[in-house]
Image: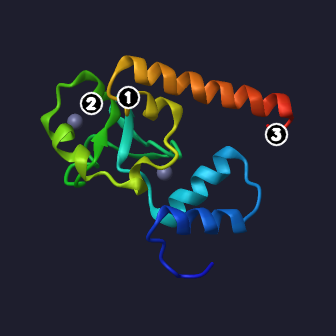
């Protein structure tokens, strides 16, 4: 693997297309290995998971001092000033190819979220029909 750093989404997509077909899980992990885990995370019983590849990346204790991490659920509940403050600092590296679960709360309103999830589901079932999955 070359050490050329990836600065833009276009460079990432170029690199990914050079790798050819990867299944969804593998693709997500490769992307995280290239640009790092998303700082947009989901949490479950105190454990924290990358919003892109779903790897466990720490627990509430381990993340103390990890700057700019935004927990999806905190935004959804709207009760965490720290996450609201960190939210604008997220970049494409954090929001690229989020999991459906993380993306659900990335959207500002319920309606937008429902529409996005519907669209993702339709695209999945279309791919399944076409035999891509
Ligand atoms: Zn990741
Ligand atoms: Zn928070």
Q: Quadrant of residue 7?
A: bottom left
Extreme-left residue of the structure:
81
What residue would you read off at disc 1?
Answer: 105
Q: Horizontal placement of 105 versus 89: left or right?
A: right
Classify 10 Å Cα crowding around label 1: few (below 14), some (14-19), many (20 and above): many
Gap in angstroms between the C-alphas marked 3 and 1: 28 Å
Q: Horizontal placement of 99 versus 111: left or right?
A: right
Q: Of the residues tagged 2 and 3, which is closer to the observer?
A: 3
Q: Which mark is residue 132?
A: 3
At x 85%, y 33%, the residue is 130
Label 2 or label 3, whichever comes before in sequence order: 2
**SS type, badge 3:** loop
Image location (x, y in percent) of residue 9: 49, 61
Q: Which mark is residue 75?
A: 2
Q: Horizontal placement of 43 versus 69: left or right?
A: right
Label 2 or label 1, whichever comes before in sequence order: 2
Q: Nearer the viewer, residue 8 or 72?
A: 8
Label 3 or label 1, whichever comes before in sequence order: 1
Gap in angstroms between the C-alphas marked 2 and 1: 7 Å
Classify 10 Å Cα crowding around label 3: few (below 14), some (14-19), many (20 and above): few
Quadrant where the N terminus is found in the figure: bottom right
Image location (x, y in percent) of residue 24: 67, 45
For disc 2, does the CB lie below 8 Å from ligand 2? Answer: yes
**SS type, badge 1:** loop
């Amino acid at each position: 693997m070359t050490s050329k750093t990836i600065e833009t989404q276009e460079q990432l997509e170029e690199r990914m297309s050079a790798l050819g077909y990867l299944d969804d899980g593998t693709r997500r992990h490769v992307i995280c290995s290239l640009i790092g885990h998303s700082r947009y995370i989901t949490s479950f019983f105190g454990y924290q998971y990358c919003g892109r590849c779903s790897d466990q990346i720490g627990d509430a204790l381990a993340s103390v001092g990890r700057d700019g991490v935004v927990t999806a659920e905190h935004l959804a509940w709207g009760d965490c000033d720290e996450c609201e403050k960190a939210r604008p600092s997220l970049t494409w590296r954090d929001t690229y190819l989020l999991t459906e679960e993380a993306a659900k709360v990335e959207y500002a309103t319920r309606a937008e979220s429902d529409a996005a999830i519907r669209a993702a589901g339709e695209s999945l079932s279309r791919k399944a029909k076409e035999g891509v999955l």
